[in-house]
């Protein structure tokens, strides 16, 4: 019997010795087959140890997902979906919520197509926690751009931001190393601080993403100051990147999008909130209405099936995305560009940031990714204003699900330091051959184009 341990290590060790099937192809012929150009092939070969660690992580997380599906007794009848009010459904919602909650180590979860985005799910969670006179404290610096209007930090036009409802807001700057300022956090809470917001991923900031271990340490510091202060973790881009999730280290709620990691590139829409049951119910009341909560809302059968299938495939797809971040970091750093995270360090999310240094380079990089995509390769991404964002933003996403960043995408705000934020699934890189990633050299005045053979 094979037992997988899903304990603390970021990339758990898994030793297997299966019997290998015989292959008719010769070793020499196989060694000459490589999906990448030489420059990238060299980087990929040098990352074999890191890739093996990711494979072990995938095995661990896949085992946890499988066990949760079995415990929820998932059957084909759960894929039927429902219409109208959504009252007459075959238990799919309940089974999906149960499986998801077990996977992330939470008491309860609500996984719904009615969440428009990760921002929407996070907003429902924040409104579940906060009331007039309360304070929201962001402990990891400024939150992602799309939350600024939710909080009331940026022009909110009286449309119902937290500030409109009398909720105060404060944020702790990051430490000089880009991580949490532990000294400042130790004495940060005030009597009216009701909720601490921890953003796991870097967002559009040039900083380290937070590991679950760091999140757990922050939660302990917060709860020592006030056990009643609630902790909300923006979990976007972090699901399945480690062998544990924030509820396992004390987070009261987490929230995120299904068209990111947990949808496995299959879920066509939706989001989730998970954590303590009392607060999941409160978030569900914000999504629907008080008294309705989790017991209503139609979901067509094709979407319900995609939610289950995407969640089951998610550990594998996230593993592919992690490998993609290693590869991008390795190649771009070798060319002299600043990267975050640094090459070969353990990952805490699926985002790889590259500091390009100019508007022209950022635009050209995104155009190159779009040209290398399986969908929309003939289109040219154009920077512009996007709802929820403070700056002009450019998006390149040749994906089968619009916004499914675990496939192949990059984006960035048109502001200093002109960093591009990549989410690159290595399997999508493979099928993009023989495309090549072009970007304009910052050293050439006429923006002559050079090739970086990433794809």
Image (cartoon, rainbow, N blue to C red):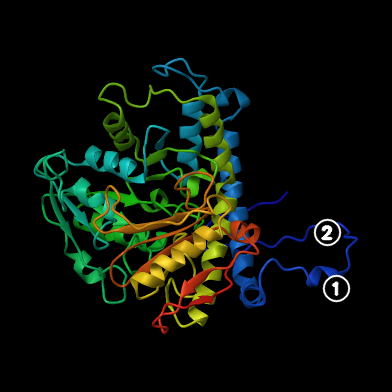
Q: Is residue 400 above or below residue 144?
A: above
Q: Nearer the viewer, residue 392 or 228?
A: 392
- Front position in the image: 399 or 210: 399
Q: Observer-nearest residue: 240 or 361?
A: 361
- 48 on left or right of 415: right
Instruction: Tell me: 243 left or right of 29.
Output: left
Residue at image coords 57%, 34%: 71
Residue displayed at 28% across by 47% down: 387
Q: Secondary structure at mark 2?
A: loop
Residue at image position (35%, 76%) is 357
Label tally: 2
Residue 28's disc is 1
Q: Give percent across and percent down for residue 433.
A: 65, 62
Label 1 vs label 2, nearer the camera: 1
Q: Quadrant of the C terminus?
A: bottom right
Q: Is residue 357 above or below residue 166?
A: below
Image position of 166 with respect to 409: above or below = above
Q: Quadrant of residue 208?
A: bottom left
Mark 1, other Cα within 10 Å: few <14 / some 14–19 / many ≥20 = few
Q: Position of residue 344 (x, y in %)?
A: 52, 74
Disc ID at residue 20: 2
Q: Nearer the viewer, residue 366 or 314?
A: 366
Residue 441 in the image: x percent, y percent? 45, 79
């Amino acid at each position: 019997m094979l037992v997988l341990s899903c304990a603390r290590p970021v990339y758990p060790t898994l030793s297997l010795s299966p019997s290998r099937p015989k292959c008719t192809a010769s070793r020499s012929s196989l060694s000459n087959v490589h999906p990448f150009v030489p420059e990238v092939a060299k980087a990929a070969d040098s990352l074999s140890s890191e890739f093996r660690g990711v494979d072990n992580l995938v095995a661990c997380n896949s085992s946890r997902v499988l066990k949760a599906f079995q415990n929820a007794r998932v059957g084909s009848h759960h894929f039927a979906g429902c219409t109208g009010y959504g009252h007459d459904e075959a238990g799919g919602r309940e089974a999906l919520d149960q499986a998801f909650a077990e996977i992330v180590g939470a008491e309860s979860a609500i996984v719904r197509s009615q969440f428009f985005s990760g921002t929407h799910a996070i907003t429902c969670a924040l409104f579940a926690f906060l009331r007039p006179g309360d304070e929201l404290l962001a402990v990891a610096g400024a939150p992602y751009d799309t939350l600024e209007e939710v909080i009331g930090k940026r022009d909110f036009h009286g449309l119902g931001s937290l500030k409109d409802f009398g909720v105060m807001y404060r944020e702790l700057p990051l430490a000089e190393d880009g991580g949490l300022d532990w000294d400042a956090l130790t004495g940060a809470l005030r009597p009216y601080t009701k909720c601490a917001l921890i953003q796991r991923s870097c967002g559009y900031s040039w900083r380290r993403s937070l590991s679950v271990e760091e999140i757990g340490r922050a939660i302990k510091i917060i709860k020592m100051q006030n056990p009643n202060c609630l902790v909300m973790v923006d979990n976007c881009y972090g699901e399945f990147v480690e062998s544990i999730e924030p509820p396992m280290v004390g987070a009261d709620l987490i929230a995120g999008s299904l068209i990111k990691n947990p949808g496995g590139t299959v879920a066509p829409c939706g989001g989730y909130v998970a954590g303590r049951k009392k607060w999941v119910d409160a978030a569900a009341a914000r999504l629907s209405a008080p008294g309705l909560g989790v017991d209503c809302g139609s979901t067509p059968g094709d979407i319900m099936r995609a939610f289950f299938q995407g969640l089951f495939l998610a550990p594998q797809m996230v593993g592919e995305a992690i490998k993609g971040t290693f590869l991008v970091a390795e190649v771009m750093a070798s060319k002299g560009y600043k990267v975050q995270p640094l090459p070969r360090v353990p990952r805490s999310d699926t985002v790889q940031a590259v500091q390009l240094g100019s508007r022209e380079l950022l635009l050209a990089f995104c155009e190159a990714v779009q040209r290398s995509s399986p969908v929309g390769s003939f289109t040219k991404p154009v920077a512009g204003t996007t709802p929820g964002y403070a700056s002009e933003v450019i998006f390149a996403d040749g994906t089968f699900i619009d916004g499914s960043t675990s496939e192949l995408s990059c984006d960035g705000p048109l502001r200093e330091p002109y960093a591009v934020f990549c989410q690159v699934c290595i399997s999508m890189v493979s099928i993009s051959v023989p495309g090549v990633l072009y970007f304009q050299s910052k050293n050439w005045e006429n923006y002559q184009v050079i090739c970086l053979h990433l794809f």
